[in-house]
Every structure is written in structure tokens, then in C-alpha cells.
Image (tube, helix red, strand yellow):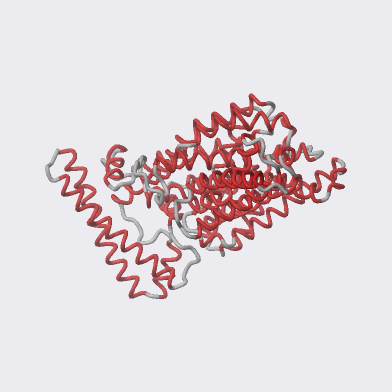
Amino acid sequence: MSLTDWLVLFLTLIFILLYGVYKGRGQKDAKSYLLANQELPWYVVLIGLMATQASAITFLSAPGQAYTDGMRFVQYYFGLPLAMIVISITFIPIFQRLKVYTAYEYLESRFDKKTRILTSFLFLMSRGLSTGISIYAPSIILSTILGWNIYLTNILTGGLLLLYTYSGGAKAIAHTQKLLFLIILGSMAFAGYLLIKQMPDGVTFNDALFIAGKSGKLNVITTDFDLSDRYNIWSGIIGGFFLALSYFGTDQSQVGRYISAKNVRTGRIGLLLNGLVKIPMQFSILLIGALLFAFFALKPAPVYFNERSYNILEEQHPELATQFNQQHNALQKKQMALSNQLLQDRDSGSENLDQTVADYKAVQKEIKELHTTVETTINEAGITIEKTDTNYIFLYFVQNTLPQGMIGLVFAVIFLASWGSISAALNSLASSSYKDIQLRWRPGDQEHDGKQQLLYSRLHTLIWAIFSIGVAMFATQMGSLIEAVNILGSLFYGPILGIFLVAFYYKKINGHNMFISAILAELSIIIIYNLDLISFLWLNVIGSAAVFFFCFIIDLFGKKNPL
């Protein structure tokens, strides 16, 4: 990067850090630290919800996801608006009325202490692991642009945001999220604009869409009902609904955003607006990935987007790398020629268009096979600890195409997005482990005064930051990060959601039966996932249904065989 980019990057990050520390002043007790005194307006709630969900993974991995698999990932969000309605009607009024710090406090009053602790533990594991992945995502950037060891950058990335998260708590998080999310949206929109401007002379936005469409990258809607297919309209609406219902309704990282609102109405407005704007936002980010495919169909692209790994391959196996380069150059020339031919045939109404499309797809298939061969070779040689180069596609475009200053800003944006989600996650983890675990195992600690509450809340934040950084050290083996974080959530969210739905709608189930049913449901999900029987989005449906099923069976046999 140029000196201008470095200045833009560091000045932006330093400004946000100082702003967060400034806004987080005046912490007195757990309520001010964990809930920002429940004074947040609706627009801060909205931005907090979106910033917490839209981590660096969204802006780093989503374009690569669309580049490799098309835009069908957007169907994952189709159940979101419906989930927001259900949560607004059922969840928010209960949480606000009970004045809870965490969603899991309600479960103790409805069931018992052990059910509350179990559900909190499931949340802590899922969110703690996911936060580790969120730390790893921006660490890739530092590792790539500085050439530093990925483990060192994990520590640096996770440690920086602690400057305001540890000291300022929920208040600092809310205000920094408000500012950084506006910077993020503006920068990503400008990056998309520059992507169109960088297309070859004479190639318009519609031309790029045409090429992306013929490449199969605009597959926004897929209607085939296939339980093994990760992304189709059915898994999106049904599985996505249950995942969103669990994530926004029972995950403390999101619940903490709207229970910090002034009142029920304020929380509802923020949540419902989130359901409306999330799909267009995610569609736009994925569209950047589809347009990137068209861009690299018309302009030279690398053999492997993780250039650092490929350079090592060239050093260790020069003859093999030369062979790969020759094959890639020949195939890319064909692809560029056929891409231009596609546009010519379309404009002239040529009868050869179908044949050109067929030839174009055949070349794409060969390029994909070559890429797979290169990737396999790199992995087998032990050159990199990452399985794919999906997360490097957008980074490559940024580094090699965007003008000075903009490169530094986009890198800053990915950091800011990461900080927004990670800081909220650490705050929610601290809330749950302090309120749901420590204070329930050690009831005497409930007598803590304000200073002691603040001290322990900050200590829990620090502990979870260290844990998440540790998880980030192993995230290199997870491939596409945006898929990894959602798969991980699906292993836990279904049973957690099932516990809350039973609490709301199955009034005769007691705490003992609920506890056993939840454990059986979670074990069932783990077994199903390990056997690879179904796409991960359906695990949310199955997990929720399993809790109901086991509750019903235990209740039924309990009646027949009373103790």
C-alpha cells in the first residue's frame, strides 16, 4: 500500500478508537456497562442490530462467496422479515417487562436454574466460537498486506478493540457502531461504483450483468427442493426463518441491542426496520462479487487469489507453477475472447449466441478445474493453513485495482465492520457469563455494589476476548468464513430457539423435562451434522422441532408412568 493508504487506514482506526473511549465514559455499574442504562433510541438500535450481524466476514467473504457460488446465498436471509415480526410480537414485550439483562434470565422464572444455565452455556459456546472467526477475518488483511504471521495478527486485531469495549461497555459499542456503519455503507457503495468504472472501455453495467448472468452468478432464486442443497428458496424461507428467529430472539449479542432500547416501541421499530433493509444490503454486497466475476472474465486474473501462497508454490515447485501459469494464460485468453464475443452476439442478435454461451461455459469449467488442481497442490504441499482462496478475491481487487486512499479506506472498513460485531459479541458474552453463570453459581455475588459489578463485567469481557482470540488461531481450517460462522450457529441455535418456543407456547412443560429435552435435542443435531445428512440451514428447524418432540415424549411417558 502507498503512504496515503497507510495514513487513511491508521487515522480512521485511531479516530474510531478514541471516539469509542470518549463516548464510553461514566460507567458506574453493570446496568450502565452492559445495557447502556436502557436509553438507546430506535435508530441506534437499528444500526446496532445491523452492525452486530454485518461483521468483517460480510464484507470480506460474501463477495468471494458470490464469485465462486453465485448470489444464491442471499436466499439465506429470506426468512428474516418474518422472524422480526414474531420477535416483535412475542419476545420483546416479555424481555422488556421483566427488565432482564440477558434473554436467559426469563428461562429461570419459567423453568428452573439449570435450564437457564444450560441455555446460556450453549449460547456462550456458539457465540464465543463465532467471535473467534470474526476476529480471524480482518486478521487475514493484516497478514496479507504486511506479510505478518497470521497468529500475530489475530492477537493484534482482537486486542485493539478492547481499548473501548473493555472501558466503555454497551454505551461505547452503540455509539461507535452508529458512526462506523455509516462509513462502511458509504465506502462499500463507492467501491462498487469504482468496480463498474474499472471495467474495460465500452463495457457497461448491463454488459457486466449479462456476463455474470451467463456465468451462472446471478442465481438469486433457486426453487429446487433439495434438503442437501445449502441455499434454495425453501431452506432460505423455512430454515432461514428459524435461524433468524433464534439469532435475533435468543442470541444475547442481538437481544442485548434491543433490550437496551428506551421502551418496547423503540425496540420494535429498530428490529422491524432491520428486517426490511438487511436483504437489499446483503444483495448489494453479493452483487459486487458477481460483478467481480464479470470483471475478471474481461481482464487478467491470477491463477490463485491468495498470491502469497502461490508465490511460495512458485519458489518450491517452479516447473509445476510454470505449467499452471501456461494453462491459465491460455484459458484466460479464451475466456476474455468469448466474453467479448458474448456481448457482440447479443448486440447483433446473432444466431451463434447459444453456441458462444456453450463454449464460454466449457472454458469456465476448465478454469475451475485448473483452480481446483492448484488449490489441491497448495494444500497437499502444506504451503498455507487456509483451505481456499475465497476470502482473498475481494482483497485482490482492492489491492490491485482501487486508487490510492481508497485502498486504505476499504481495509479500514473491514476492520470497522469486524469491531462492530466483535465488540457487541464480547459485551453479550460478558453479560451472560456474569449474570447467568457466575451470579447463579455464586448467589452471594449478587450483593456486589456498583463498583464490584463494573469490575466483574469488565473482567468477563477480557476473558472472552482472550478466548475468542484463541479460537481465531484455529479458524484457518474453515474455508469460506461466511459459511463457517453460519454453520457453527446452526449447530446451537435450533435447540436454543426450541427452549424459548416451548417456554412461550408449551406451558405445561416443567424445568426438569425441559432440561433433558434440550440436551437430547442438541446431541441429535450434532449427530445429524456429523453424518452430513442434510444442509446446515435445516438444522435450525430440526433442532427447534426436536426440543418440542422430546418434551412431548417425556411428558407423555411421565403421565403414563408417574413416579
Q: How many marks?
A: 0
Percent position of residue 335, x then y: 25, 54
Extreme-left residue of the structure: 351
Q: Residue at x 43, y 55 (%)?
A: 390
In front here: 349 or 448? 448
Left or right: 439 as drawn, with respect to 65: right
Q: Is residue 258 left or right of residue 30?
A: left
Q: Relative to the observer, which residue lies in front, 301 or 354?
A: 354
Q: Residue at x 64, y 60 (%)?
A: 470
As drawn, 57 above or below 185? below
Question: Given the current orientation, which residue lies at the most extreme top position?
Answer: 265
Q: Which is more toward the observer, 427 or 264? A: 264
Of 237 and 421, the residue lying toward us: 237
Q: Measured from the top left, where is residue 125 in percent x and y?
A: 64, 53
* Percent of width and height locating residue 242: 52, 40
Query: Who's the residue at 48% across and 63% down the image?
Result: 386
**Residue 419 in sight here:** no
User: Is residue 28 among the parts visible in the rendering?
Assistant: yes
Q: Position of residue 476 (x, y in %)?
A: 53, 61
